[in-house]
Amino acid sequence: MKGSSTPKKAVILVVDDDPRYVQLVRVNVNASGYRVLTATDGATAVKMVETMQPDLVILDVMMPGLDGYEVCRRIREFSLVPIILLTARGEQYHKLQGFRSGADDYVTKPFGAQELIARMEAILRRTNPPKKEKEPPAAFECRDLTVDFAHHRALIRGKDANLSAVEFKILCQLVANAGFIVSQDDLLSKVWGTEYHEDRDILKVSIHRLRKKIEDDPRHPKYIHTKHGIGYIFSVGQE
């Protein structure tokens, strides 16, 4: 099962001295779309967290040498990476000990692969929330022209230019790419639809009408410039 809101190809470090559990977790985590690193002892795990900076650690408690609690405490000295502890002990005391060591969650062996993946993805969603899309600007201003996106209109020196819906769409595409050439095919597809991508005449006529409404001298435009054989560019320079 793949999580839809979690980061793609997040790196998961699996730490367990039992190769059977390492293989079980690795196969299922890989199948869920994540990259997997493995370690079989606590000291190696601490070094790998420091050098490889995984997105989440799945850590067995009962290991020789450094046990999972101590590994967790050492990782917490330098990293806030989410940690899920795995253990055969399900008593309340051991769970509390795990949380006090800095773990984020606790899964008791034997466990179902789906449960582990679900807990892992829930933590990743909390610690890596999706980025909010940037709010589009309410308006675009350039010299005497104002494009009011919220009210779907263009103003010249404060007066409504009375653009048609098509003319406004063309202008929006151009100002969204101000300073860059927008190809004829791109404008046709974005404004009229893909089936119009070769209808250059309709675009030429619409650009002519748009210029008559926003340019002081449509024959010598200061906003919308033609790049012959390529497309159009909205100029933001002082011309």
Image (cartoon, rainbow, N blue to C red):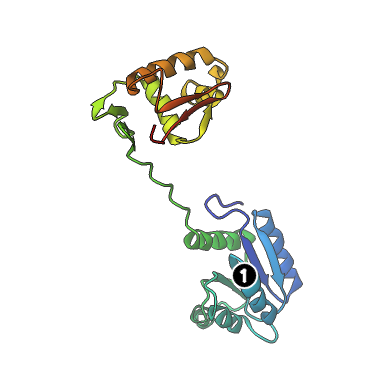
Whole-percent x, y for residue 39 in the image: 71, 73
What residue is shown at x 64% (from left), y 54% (from top)?
A: 32
Q: Quadrant of the C terminus?
A: top left
- Tell me the residue at 51%/12% (across/down): 201
Q: Residue furthest right?
A: 19
Q: Can the viewer see residue 205? A: yes
Pick the front one: 81 or 170: 170
* Relative side of 218 to 118, left or right: left
Residue 25 is at least partly visible in this image: no
Q: Is residue 105 above or below residue 198?
A: below
Query: Of residues 181 and 126, which is closer to you in this image?
Result: 181
Towards the viewer: 117 or 89: 117
Question: Could you tell me which secondary element the residue under label 1 belongs to?
Answer: strand
Position of residue 20 measured from the top left corner of the image (x, y, whole percent): 75, 69
Give left or right: position of 89 versus 161. right
Q: Residue at x 36, y 41 (%)?
A: 137
Res 194 quadrant in image: top right
Residue 132 at what x, y percent from top left? Answer: 43, 50
Q: Nearer the viewer, residue 89 or 123?
A: 123
Residue topped by disc 1: 58
Around disc 1, counting alpha carbons within 10 Å, would you say few (fewer than 14), some (14 to 19), or many (20 or more)?
A: many
Residue located at (69% from left, 66% from top) = 37
Amino acid tagged 1 = Ile
> Residue 238: percent from the left, percent from the top?
38, 35
Displayed quadrant of residue 208: top left
